[in-house]
Each structure stands twice: as structure tokens, then as C-alpha cells.
Image: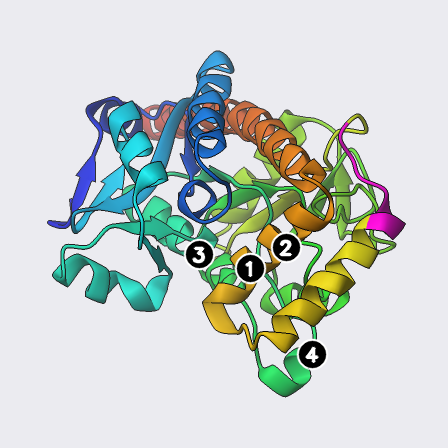
Amino acid sequence: MNQYIDIHPRVLKAIRNNEPVVALESTIISHGMPYPQNVEMALSVEKIIENEGAVPATIAIIDGRIKVGLTPDEITKLAQLKNVLKVSKRDFGYCISKKYNGATTVSATMLVASMVGIKVFATGGIGGVHRDAQQTFDISRDLEELANENVCVVCAGAKSILDLNLTLEYLETKGVEIIGYQTDELPAFYTRESGLHVDYQLDTPEEVAKLIHVKWSLGLKGGIVVANPISKLYSMDKSIIDQEIEKALLLAKENNIKGKEITPFLLSKIKALTEGKSLDANIQLVYNNAKLAAQIAVCYEKLWLNFHALSFDIIYLLW
């Protein structure tokens, strides 16, 4: 294993024994939610995954070490620390060499998950092509890692602060399937509706697991996006959230907020503009995604084990 990576014993055991594991990002802890809701959310997500029969593996950088699977104390530390670096691919070398603390983005979490052999990852929403990207060239690294790493990402679609149509076009070019879970419409993070269609609709964890197993068994490289709509109970009205996003975007422009700071700034402003309703929705959609991701991971490992057992039997018979 890589000399800069520490894998929690429970996670390492699960990986070695081909047991289901679900990776979790950490920017949602340090940059996505305030304390103490971030700790409560992170611990609850891990519990949801455990209850579905999988092992949670929250990924972060603590004192210059990549951690795959955090202890409750490490989660609390990350949630309370100030000046935690938001780590994407370009930031690993700097963060680790300086022995800093870092929270992994969707793209960075995918990279680490791929390094250690975790195939399923749950998050809130993926990044994508930002609005006005034709002028700014602001495109999330998430999309490149989705094209390159064999990881299934369960999310509530792309964040609604983005240009969702261009995000879909970009992923199509990269050959990344967008699977709508029990829907043919792309969910837009806080809301179930976007007006845009996904590539395919699948309705059970077993169907999703079979698709990703077939894709990777064929040697086709790249991730899969499973777009899982927020539950109707917590979904926000599309017209209202769109209005608040436009206000937040205007504030970002007025304050010259760019690059990696834009997403946390917008989410924070939207939370204030919606009087906290967006934060409640964010937490609930993460729970929803964690549960589905665990179910997919369980089904995928069963398929993987059955496939390899059958392959072994065939080889034995031929021999």
C-alpha cells in the first residue's frame, strides 16, 4: 500500500475480504456544513451505511497522512479545525509534504478510493461545468476523475448552482453514464427536477450493480454517476431555489469569488437566503445517497464474488 496512506483496520479487512465498502468525502464536513451539524451528519451517514451491511470509509488528510476511514475523534477534529485545505488532485503533494490537514473533494475522494480498491462512493452532489464557463473555463475536476477512475458515484445529481446542461454534455463526451435511480430526469441537488433527461433509468440496486460489473468486466475505463433524487418530503421548490441561486451567483460576482472558493460561498449564501432550509435538504439527500450506495456496494460484491467463483470453477473443469 502507498506509504502516505493509512487505512483503518476495519476498512482494510473489508477490502482484503471483498466485503462491501462505501467511500465518503470530507469537504462536506469541513466546508459544506457548520459545526456541530457536520459532525452529526458525518457520524449518521456512517451509521446508515453500516445498517445496510457495508463498511463506511470517510477519506481525509490528517496531519499530512491520507486517512481511509476516520475515527469519530478524527471526524470531530476535522469538523472543528480552521484553515483545512480543500484538496483536489493538484493539492495532494503540497498538503502531505507540509503535513497539513485536508478535506478531500469528490475528485480527490475518487482518486483515493480507486488507489485502495473501493468501488462505490456516496456524496451529496458532484461538481460540473460552472455557469459562464465559456468565459471562465471553470470546470470541476470531478468530471475528469469520473472519466478516469473506476468508481460508482451515488449523488443527488450535479449541484444546482452549475450549468447542468453543459455538465451532461461534458460527461457524455467523456463516456460517463448518468443513471437515474427510479427516474428518467436528472435531479438537481436540492430539487428532484431539472428538466433534463438522464442516459438510462434503473430502479433497483441490483440493476445498478450489474451495470457497473459488466462495464468494468469489459475493461471499459471510467466511473458511473447514479443520480438519486432527494426524497419528495425534503425536495425544495425548483422555482424558489432557482431564484435564490441567482441571488447567490450575483453576490459571488460582486465579491469576485472564483475557483475552489465559489462552491462553499454559494452554498453558504443559499443557506442564508433560504433560512436554513437548503442545509436541511443537503443533510437529507446525503443520508438518502449513503443508503443507496451501501445497497449497491452489497449487491456489487455479491456479483463480483459469484463471477470469480464461476470463473474458478470453469478453470478447474478445463484443467
Q: Residue at x 14, y 50 (%)?
A: 4
Residue to which mark 2 is pinned: 269
**Tag 1–tag 4 contact (CB < 8 Å):** no
Measure how far apart labels 2 and 4 are at the Cα level. 19 Å
Which circle's residue, 4 or 3, is located before the other in the chain?
A: 3
**Which SS class for mark 2?**
helix
Label 4, residues with CA under 10 Å away: few <14, some 14-19, many ≥20: few
| Residue 136, quarter of picture | bottom right
Percent across and percent down for residue 21 are 40, 29
Residue range (magenta): 234-240
- Tell me the element at label 3: helix
Residue topped by disc 4? 132
- Estimate the spatial distance between the alpha carbons at disc 1 and disc 3, rounded to whole Å: 19 Å
User: Vertical placement of 303 versus 155: above or below?
Assistant: above
Q: Which residue is mark 1?
A: 265
Q: What's the colour scheme?
A: rainbow
Label 2 sits on what residue type? Answer: Lys
- 76 shown above or below 214: above
Q: Residue at x 68, y 35 (%)?
A: 281
Q: Is residue 16 visible?
A: no
**Cβ–Cβ under 8 Å for marks 2 and 1:** yes
Q: Which numbered disc, 2 or 4, marks the residue that appears first in the sequence? A: 4
The residue that label 3 is drawn on is 107
Q: Quadrant of the N terminus?
A: top left
Seen in the picture, residue 178 relative to 260 is either above or below; the reply is above
Name the N-terminal-most of marks 3 and 2. 3
Q: Nearer the viewer, residue 122 or 213?
A: 122
Q: Quadrant of residue 128?
A: bottom right
Q: Position of residue 13 (x, y in %)?
A: 24, 23
Kindly identify the residue that appears in the image at 58 percent across and 42 percent down: 124
Q: Position of residue 63 (x, y in %)?
A: 16, 47
